[in-house]
Image: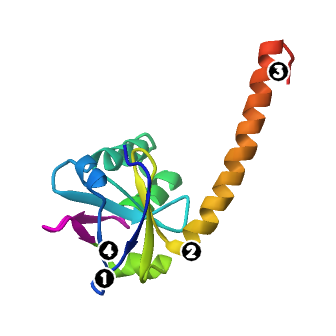
Amino acid sequence: MFLSTFEKQLDVKRRIVVPQDFRALATGPFEGVFCFPSIESDCIEGGGKALFDRYVGVMEELDFGDPLRTALETSVLGGMAKLSFDTAGRITLPEGLCDMFGLTEWVTVVGLGDRFQIWQREAFQAHRAAQREIAREGLAHLRALQRAARAGVAQ
């Protein structure tokens, strides 16, 4: 699993060192990762072959020509870049993806289990605060539902 959060500095060629644990997880047909514009957030999403296969599987469940399938194909496959590791374990982020999300100097790399995201540092700080609040409220609501279910109270 891709775990933890790292701050990394982009060099002048838009390269970042991918955390060693992340590199070990990115096994597949080449030594590297797949990256594309995230659908859910303003950041780059990435992962190994398993993530790529998962997205393809979701798309293939939809009929050819289905508007959602076309949107996913355009967003994921059309925006995807295969980024190989160099000998120092770095990847070079495509200029277009960096421009799209304002990645210039410092970035935050966030592990999310079967995938990771690369954020502009300040944008991630705001996103993390919002996500913590959603998680806090959602967990409190879930616990209340569980207590009510144990007590036999319908919600």
CA separation in Å, label 3 and label 4: 49 Å
Q: Residue drawn 20% across and 64% down?
A: 89
**Label of residue 28 in the image:** none
The residue located at (51%, 60%) in the rendering is: 39
Whether 89 is among the magenta residues is yes
Mark toward the start of the polypeptide (1 vs 2): 1
Instruction: Return the disc, 2 or 4, that comes first in the chain's sequence.
Output: 4
**Kind of residue indicated by mark 3:** Ala
The residue labelled by disc 1 is: 11
CB atoms of marks 3 and 1 within 8 Å: no
Residue indicated by mark 4: 93
- Is 23 positioned to the left or the right of 55 in the image? left
Instruction: Find disc 2 in the rendering and name its residue.
Output: 122
Which label's residue is closer to the chain start, 3 or 1? 1
For marks 3 and 4 on the same chain, the one whose residue lies earlier in the sequence: 4
Which residue corresponds to mark 3?
Answer: 148
